[in-house]
Amino acid sequence: MLVMSSCDDNNAPQPADTSSTTLLVYMVAANSLGVDQTVQNDIIPSRDKRDLEEMKEAARAGALGKNHRVIIFHSTYESDGLLYELKADGQLTQIKEYEGLSAVTVAGMSRVLDDVQALAPAEKFGIVFWGHGTGWIENGQDETGKTAPAAAGKSRLSVADTPVTTSYGPVRSKWMNVTSMRRALEGRDISFIYFDCCLMAGVEVAYELRECTPYIVASPSELPIDGMPYDLNLKELLLATPNGLRQAARNTFDSYNNKTSSIDRTCTISLICTDALPALARAVGDIYARTPLPHPAAQVTNYYGSSRQGPNLDLGEYVTALAAEAGIDTAPFDKALADAIPLALATKRIWDEYTIYTASGLATYVFNSPSAISNNGYERLEWCRDVAARHIHD
């Protein structure tokens, strides 16, 4: 059992009996998602408030069952962090308040995870990461806590957002690198991770977190601002099973694919089995080793634009195109990809603007010159060292 050692834990409750599943919803809302909006003189509650209401609705409908627990960490502009437990009657009971905690640092996230796993021990432990995401890009807070220069970018999530920078967050404009997230998560026996944020189904992200959890649900593209339907998915996530995760992914996809407006009918989502990622890395690396840069670039689905290069192109389509150009048999790669991605769902277009030609379930960074491997800290990632760097050879 983990022991809390923070200085403001004097009134913390004692751990309860072990339950079947504890789900932590890790909400970072000190950003545009935590701000109320005014539309034609009507106040629209912030996205975090609306999602909390969906969770309450699910609880009142019986999603918690007899022995599941839902713990919510909520970082806002008003508070460094509040820890709640969602009760079966839909009420939120505050457990503690954090002061001086940054939720997107290794120390801050580790402290919250320590507290939750000590207070709500369970046979299974799942995490939903709620907020903004931009995939693998390594230019946020580094391991010393400093902030690296921001990359240029764009977001359709809100005109109030600052330019897209990196990975996960933000909390008051500070972001967390995926390499830092790995350090906070490793060694915790996490049953699954669900990313309720954009662009996190990149092979670089999944590979970096492969030893942290056996399953990841995430989107290779932008996820519309409504995010996951918590009223439908809370019960499925608390099962903490592959079938429950499949259904949660399908519920999210259907909630957008059934929209009547074509611009709202946009969603990609995948279930990733991380145990299969080492075999996928070997298969991709073998093809990269035989296709040195520069090489011709076929049209490949881009989950964040229309260029044939960039950080979010479809992995399956890209590797298949490379292999075809070089006359390489893709059977080992095809099997490895199928094992790693048992479910990949995608609408035909993104924002009714970008076509999805093939949806393999994973995105990847596609670069066309050896020097581009250093862009945005890519060389820091384990996928780069183990796989992508094999493009660069004599």
Image (cartoon, helix red, strand yellow):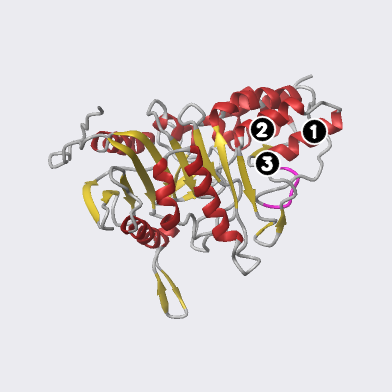
The tag on residue 337 is: 2
Residue 187 in the figure: left or right of residue 330 = left
Question: Residue 144's quadrant in the figure?
Answer: top left
Residue sitting at x 72%, y 31%: 334
Residue sitting at x 59%, y 34%: 204
Question: Residue 99's quadrant in the figure?
Answer: top left
Q: CA distance from mark 3 to mark 2?
A: 8 Å
Cβ–Cβ under 8 Å for marks 3 and 1: no
> Where's residue 158, x and y in %?
51, 62
Q: CA distance from mark 3 to mark 1?
A: 15 Å
Cβ–Cβ under 8 Å for marks 3 and 2: yes
The mark nearer the N terminus, 2 or 1, is 1
Given residues 309 and 278, the one toward you in this image is 278
Q: Classify the position of the N terminus by image quarter.
A: top left
> Where's residue 171, x and y in %?
40, 49
Cβ–Cβ under 8 Å for marks 2 and 1: no
Which residue range is magenta in the image? 305-310
Residue topped by disc 3:
360
Q: CA distance from mark 2 to mark 1?
A: 15 Å
As shown in the figure, which amino acid type bears the numbered disc 1? Leu
As shown in the figure, which amino acid type bears the numbered disc 3? Ser
Residue topped by disc 1:
322
The mark nearer the N terminus, 3 or 2, is 2
Q: Secondary structure at mark 3?
A: loop
> Where's residue 194, x and y in %?
47, 43
Residue 341 in the figure: left or right of residue 101 = right
Query: For the view shown, which residue lies furthest in the left direction?
Result: 10
Q: Secondary structure at mark 1?
A: helix
Residue sitting at x 25%, y 28%: 2
Given residues 140 and 16, the one toward you in this image is 16
